[in-house]
Image (cartoon, grey):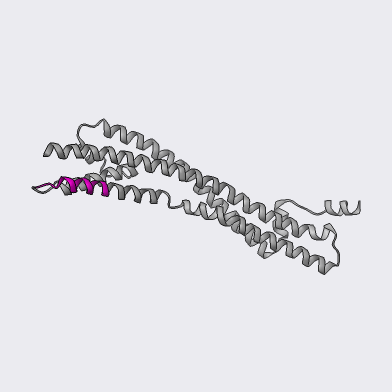
Amino acid sequence: MDLLIATQNVGFSPIKLFLDADLVVKSVIIGLALASVWGWTIILSFTVKMSGINKKSDTFEREFWGSSDIAAFAKTHSQNELPVAKVFAAGMAEWRLSTNGKSIDRSGTRERLATAMDATIAAETDRLANRLNFLATTGSVAPFVGLFGTVWGIMRSFAAIAAEQNSSLAVVAPGIAEALFATAIGLFAAIPAVIAYNRFSHRLNQYEARMGRFADGFHGTLSRELELEG
């Protein structure tokens, strides 16, 4: 009964656990909390960004395939920063360079068009995925950082036992609670990061494939134009 009362008198609220923790555990908790906040910022911003990009890409592709004048369409969208629009711009730029002379190397033009658009697709995919590396890093590292806090808290608990010459739960509970709290924060930061990274990687792969399909269709259109010029 005395042990139960002593245990109940120990505060286990998250704020009290943080305030009672030593400098090392506090540093771990603060670092993990900041990583979690930044991770959620990336998650929310990327979700909104990809949703907007997909909607704008729908409009862009619908207008492109419905256009009868590619040159006029290119002039209208010359400042468009949409990834798929940049693929289109890369194809148009290579088309103009390759067909500007008196003689046209049709085979070489087709290869250069494919290379220019493929390079732009890769560059745009890398640009979209830029901040996702943080989610991958957080997902893999945060549990181990939390584990470090766990180990440190348990070490403090053993130190308290040695100092107090008392192995009662009231003595060791605070250190163990700090340890488990650090682990919980580590998992709180890691789990959403891993889920979001896997989901966003899938969405990026889908959008990369979409740009590839657009590039293939545009390449076919320009190839037919080369045949007409021949």
Please indicate, yes or no, whether residue 106 appears anywhere in the rendered image: yes
In the rendering, at what x and y percent does residue 8 appear?
A: 83, 51
Looking at this view, name the residue that lies furthest to the bottom.
Answer: 163
Residue at the left extreme, as displayed: 102
Q: Nearer the viewer, residue 9 or 50?
A: 50
Residue drawn at x 39%, y 35% as measured from the top left: 55
Residue 199 lies left or right of residue 126; in this view the side is right
Label tally? 0
Residue 129 vs 223, above or below: the answer is: below
Query: Can you tell which quarter of the image residue 177 is in?
Result: bottom right
Is 211 left or right of 174, judged from the image as shown? left
**In this rendering, would 119 be left or right of 135?**
left
Name of the residue lying farthest toward the top: 66
Answer whether residue 71 is visible to the viewer in this image.
no
Image height of 39 relative to 71, above or below = below
Q: Residue at x 83, y 57 (%)?
A: 169
Q: Is residue 196 magenta?
A: no
Q: Where is the C terminus found, in terms of image quarters?
A: top left
Q: Locate residue 179: give its quadrant.
A: bottom right
Q: Which residues are magenta?
A: 103-115
Most prominent secondary structure in the magenta stretch? helix
Q: Is residue 107 magenta?
A: yes
- Residue at the spot 50% in from the left edge and 54% down from the top edge: 134
Q: Position of residue 50 (x, y in %)?
A: 43, 41
Which residue is drawn at the image coordinates 15% and 38% (left, top)? 227
Q: Is residue 120 above or below residue 179?
A: above
Percent across and percent down for residue 164 are: 84, 67
Classify residue 92 by image quadrant: top left
Task: State the image coordinates of residue 82 (x, y, percent, origin top left).
Answer: 34, 43
